[in-house]
Image (cartoon, grey):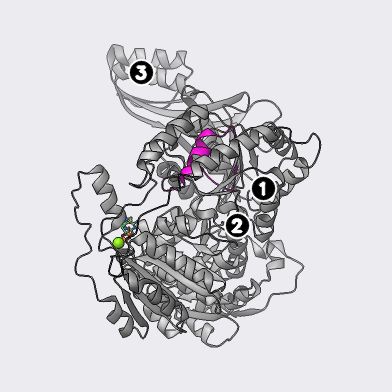
Amino acid sequence: MQQEAPGSAVISLLVDNESGALARIVGLFSGRGYNIRSLTVAPVDEHGMQSRVNIVTTGTPADIRQIKAQVERLVPVSRVADLTADGPHVAREMAMIKVVSSGEPRTEALRIAQAFRARAVDTTASSFVFELTGSTDKLDSFIELMRPLGLVEVSRTGVAAICRGPQTIQSL
Amino acid sequence: MGEQDKMTPQTASSAPDAQKPQTLPGAEVLMRALDEQGVEVIFGYPGGAVLPIYDALFKQNRIRHVLVRHEQAAVHAAEAYARSTGKVGVVLVTSGPGATNAVTGLLDALMDSIPLICLSGQVPSSLIGNDAFQEADTTGITRPVTKYNYLVRRPEDLAPAVHEAFTIARSGRPGPVLIDLPKNITVGDAPYVAASQTPMRVAKGTAEPDREAVKRAVAAMKKARRPLFYTGGGVINAGPKACENLRKLVKLTGFPITSTLMGFGAYPGNDKQYLGMLGMHGMYEANLATHGCDVLIALGSRFDDRVTGRVDAFSPDSFKIHADIDASQINKIIPVDQPIVGDAGRIIEMMIEEWEKEPAYAHQADLAAWWEQIEAWRALDCLRFSQDQAPDAVIKPQKAIQRIYELARETGRDTYVSTEVGQHQMWAAQFFRFDDPNRWLTSGGLGTMGYGLPAAVGAQIAHPDALVLDIAGEASTLMNIQELGTIAQYRLPVKLFIINNHYMGMVRQWQELLHGSRYSESYSDALPDFVKLAESFHAKGLRATRMEELDDTIRAALEHDGPVVVDLCVTEGENCFPMIPSGAAHNEMILGPDQEERGAKVTREGMMLV
Ligand SMILES: Cc1ncc(C[n+]2csc(CCOP(=O)(O)OP(=O)(O)O)c2C)c(N)n1
Ligand SMILES: [Mg+2]
């Protein structure tokens, strides 16, 4: 097996909604030295019995396979998919970005927000809170552009992801 | 995921038609569930949070309780009970310090794939989070050292949690499961739910192995010219039938076989196809065969770093087949060519079926040449050591261990052997050979000093009529020496052989080889008089210091119908060889002084051949 280049991967899990389940997953990552770039969790079935966890992690393809195999061992985890490897998928996150400025920077911020289709969800005379949904890269570039224009605070959800087409995490 | 109190399978909704379950005090529900799971023995230690459980134990007579002297020992005893019987071991400890004392044992069981249930007391649910007396976040602390754990928060979850815990502990790759029991749950009433009424999550690794993968593996085996089986504890865990089939497969193929420390007895230790243990202190022939083989068949073994040595130099030219029940072990350390996920026993069976199909194995001549090479390595006699035979000569530790093995074998009794951790453990691994599985009890993955004496307790409780030996070091044995109290109380005829070299020998050896012989803190100073110590624990104490006393002392110990502690005073400076220094490859083994010269030559020749 050749050493393959490291990259980032989105791993999605279905987990029994029991106390300690998230700690088990997070503990596995920290205990084995795997990286968590972002993490999202919420119940997804109609009775709230199962949660979906999306984790963005990094490593070589062999590392990612190992992470997946380790997570699969956890008793409350009923499904694991490496969305990056298992076919095309959509990955989105949402961010709220606060910009405090006036004059030219303020108008420039608003103009860029429009170009990105970010929504101003809170507006005062001296500030905006923009809401933006999109790929991690899109959010990153928006935030970079806001930095010189009075950016003071960022709140991001982390990535939620799903595979494209009729397939589901269950059928992958 | 958060705050919901959803623990364990949802019983209420799952069996709507079943009659209303019987309600009993929680502690009695627990007893019934344990009984239904076939539990015969619990190793434990009482305390406030588990008093209701001890009361329920008192009121029944189906389950026996063995009172240890430290909770760590309860876990090791249960591990040995489990390893030596194939059943699930059960531990009962109180909250707080009782539970934290069990942590080392739980990790030991996790690393060595031992099925265990640890029941821990917890403060009442209403006090959890209040820093109550003897409160510990036990599920938090034990999460990374168990296969799974529960905090039972609702009475209706109690019986289902117990049933599911046993399923999880014993299925797939076995391991320890902890159930934390708040006092209000064991005191208050709870419904009894039978195992058959409990929905359980399927254990991973229980699926039928992929037949095509087995076919490809066997096809590679048929092309092999220098094959080698490398088997581990997974075969033991797969059960006696798996071990029987392993023998059949090895005989059918005529291939050599080496074993990990955890796999002893899966294949008969004295058979000539068996090369002994591989790895850091493994046999010369086993390690060079591992290095030189062209097809390596790993069955229920996990390429531990004590086995592989330098990973990038491990068995460099072989096609690697890896059968393991735990998919995460495959390609974890060593990339393999043919993985097979599943139970080792089932995979061995399928390998036999495939091997017996056409075409027949056609490389007998190459295999014979390979055996010739192996015999040349074997001829080096890598375990040979020189012992001064004068009556007053100091005993070498190797000699002591070799004689214990030989004299125990002469008794013809079914023998279980536990060890502590250190040089004595490695010498025991080298000199003891087992005809049957489940007889060798050692802490492999974690290397826990203090394992051996409580393990001997567990084995003797499980096999009252068997001969149970603990091969110990003087330093290790002091880590759980209080178990002499348990041994006395239950009149367990355990034979504790202390290979007393007055050093943490394994530490001393590494200091000699790697740290310029600066023996920092590795001298066993201020040792107790082990003979008097034995006597104060109502056991027989014996000592041998000279060669002329060795055999008689061992015999006297083996013949004594009761617990014995033997202080075998041996030479202090002996090193354990062969040795692959960490970070080195299998063909860079260090040999003992007796073999060094010839070894260098044989190694060079060997290298040219493979
Ligand atoms: C609980 C624990 N602490 C420390 C160690 C590190 N260690 C490994 S072997 C050893 C020395 C063991 O000495 P002894 O029991 O006398 O055995 P010997 O090597 O002399 O045969 C030590 C300290 C360990 N394995 N376990
Ligand atoms: Mg010692």
Say which amino acid is labelled 1: Val
Res. B517 mark: none
**Extreme-front residue of the structure:** B390
How packed is label 1: few (under 14 Cα within 10 Å), some, or many (20 or more)?
some
Query: Where's residue B343, x and y in %?
Result: 66, 50
- Residue highlighted by disc 2: B268
- Residue highlighted by disc 1: B250
- Residue highlighted by disc 3: A144
**Extreme-bottom residue of the structure:** B59
Is residue B91 in sight in this rendering?
no
Query: Where's residue B59, x and y in %?
Result: 55, 88
Q: Using residue B501 as the reference point, say whether residue B196 is left or right of it.
A: right
Boundaries of the magenta span: B279-302
Task: Specify the quarter for ligand 1.
Answer: bottom left
Query: Where's residue B574, x and y in %?
Result: 30, 55
Q: Using residue B387 as the reference point, say whether residue A167 is left or right of it.
A: right
Say which amino acid is labelled 2: Pro
Task: Name which quarter of the figure residue B191 lies in.
Answer: bottom right
User: Distance between the Cα atoms at labels 2 and 1?
Assistant: 11 Å
How packed is label 2: few (under 14 Cα within 10 Å), some, or many (20 or more)?
some
Is residue A167 in sight in this rendering?
yes
Q: Nearer the viewer, residue B557 or B106?
A: B557
**Badge 1 sits on which subunit?**
B
At 51% across and 41% down in the image, what residue appears? A41
**Badge 3 sits on which subunit?**
A
Secondary structure beneath disc 3? helix
Secondary structure beneath disc 2? loop
Q: Is residue B289 magenta?
A: yes
In this rendering, which labeled residue sits more in front, label 3 or label 2? 2
**Badge 2 sits on which subunit?**
B
Task: Name which quarter of the figure residue A124 lies in.
Answer: top left
Query: Where's residue B531, x and y in %?
Result: 30, 79
